[in-house]
Image (cartoon, rainbow, N blue to C red):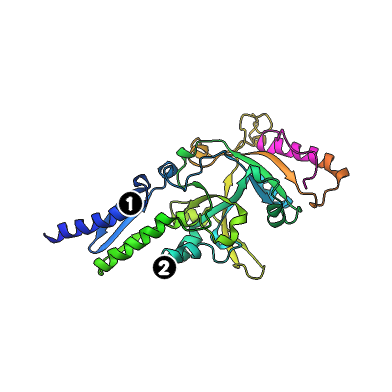
Amino acid sequence: MNKEEYLDKISDEFMSILHKYIPNRMIVGNGYSEMSFNARLSNKNDRFSESQYYFSGNKKFIHWTSVQNLMSIINYREIRLYNLHNSSDSDEFAYAAEKLNIDKNQIDYSKKYLYTLSFCKASELANENLWKEYGKNYQGVAIEFEIVNDPNEWNNFMLSEVFYEIPKNLLEMKKELKTFHEKYPNASTYIDLGKLIAFHKKPDYSREVEIRLSTYFPFNTTEAYEKFCNTEFRLEKGRPRETDYFGLKVWVDNESPFVKSDKPEFDRRLDVGTSYFTENPQIKITNIYFGKNCGISNQEFTPFWTKLNHITHYKLGYEIENLELNLYG
């Protein structure tokens, strides 16, 4: 057996381990250089449809936030995805990475370039624990939204439940790769599981029943990343001092007379190109629930509701038909 045949044999063994535990369609490339073997996961969301990292249920969700952030979402017509430096769980990502022997450099890289939005199924609206934790004890709002386009068309976006234990298939793959390295001690292997590990948290967080929308390195070039990602500085103790985010556009009805105008200076249509709401998630706000402690009195709520509907008409192009007329809780 010559050198090339020997390397092909080792590469085949490496790939056979991966394919045993990761659906074949998820892996779109592999290769080697000398004794360094690598494989790559797809950026196409439909490639994950045979795995646990593909959400196939009802696409209506609840996202808790503050009243100020709600108005920012409507006014700027975008919702922010933060990188994992923003997480309230300081050990996030490190938990799964440690279980799978992923080195610190890879952890730091993935936490910087992995952006997520967290929410729950719409059926969790009455979950008191979530209102207390993420609705700040009913001081915030719960935004109900629906993803209305086809996730199979998404490029570099994933939607999945969060798992509160490491799947057995990944743990078994780790064991087989350890045996592989004992057999070939001079070999190095690499497959970036960063986009999968984002969907894992410690069992302590299981009451969050979290679902995540994520994107891994959302821009093709460093220049685009620097231009379109933004930085926030945080002053809270125990949290990273800075975190990055970018705005994912929410859906706007460009045909609505509330945003469309023949006069360029009054035209408010969302100019994102024809493929934006095909390759990216198309988020439509369907309801807003204000917590009972949000600072709006019962007497103030009706005029506030009227004003909010007026704003959504002119910013999003549609009325939120089911906007609640009472404070939740």
Say above or below: 245 vs 263. below
- Closest to the camera, between mark 1 and mark 2, is 1
Residue at 57% x, 39% y is 59
Q: Quadrant of residue 238?
A: bottom right
Mark 1 near mark 2, Cβ–Cβ under 8 Å? no
Q: Which residue is at the far right?
A: 299
* Image-based side of 167 in relation to 37, left or right: right
The crowding category of the residue bearing disc 2, from other C-alpha atoms within 10 Å (few below 14, some 14 to 19, many at least 20), is: few
The residue that disc 2 covers is 103
| Disc on res. 20 | 1
* Image-based side of 87 in relation to 109, left or right: right
* Image location of residue 278, percent across then percent down: 49, 37
- Magenta segment range? 305-329
* Image-based side of 214 in relation to 5, left or right: right
Question: For numbered disc 2, what is the local secondary structure?
Answer: loop
Chain-order first, disc 1 or disc 2: 1
Question: For numbered disc 1, what is the local secondary structure?
Answer: helix
| Disc on res. 231 | none
Say above or below: 206 vs 310. below
Foreground pick, 152 / 67: 152
Mark 1 and mark 2: span between their CA atoms?
Answer: 23 Å
Disc 1 marks a residue whose amino acid type is: Lys
Residue at 67% x, 35% y is 266
Disc 2 marks a residue whose amino acid type is: Asp
* Image location of residue 287, percent across then percent down: 69, 39
Quadrant of the rendering where the N terminus is positioned:
bottom left
* Image location of residue 248, percent across then percent down: 57, 46
Query: Residue 50 lies in magenta, yes or no?
Result: no
Query: Residue 316 lies in magenta, yes or no?
Result: yes
Q: How many labels does the image show?
A: 2
Q: In which quarter of the image is residue 103?
A: bottom left
The crowding category of the residue bearing disc 1, from other C-alpha atoms within 10 Å (few below 14, some 14 to 19, many at least 20), is: few
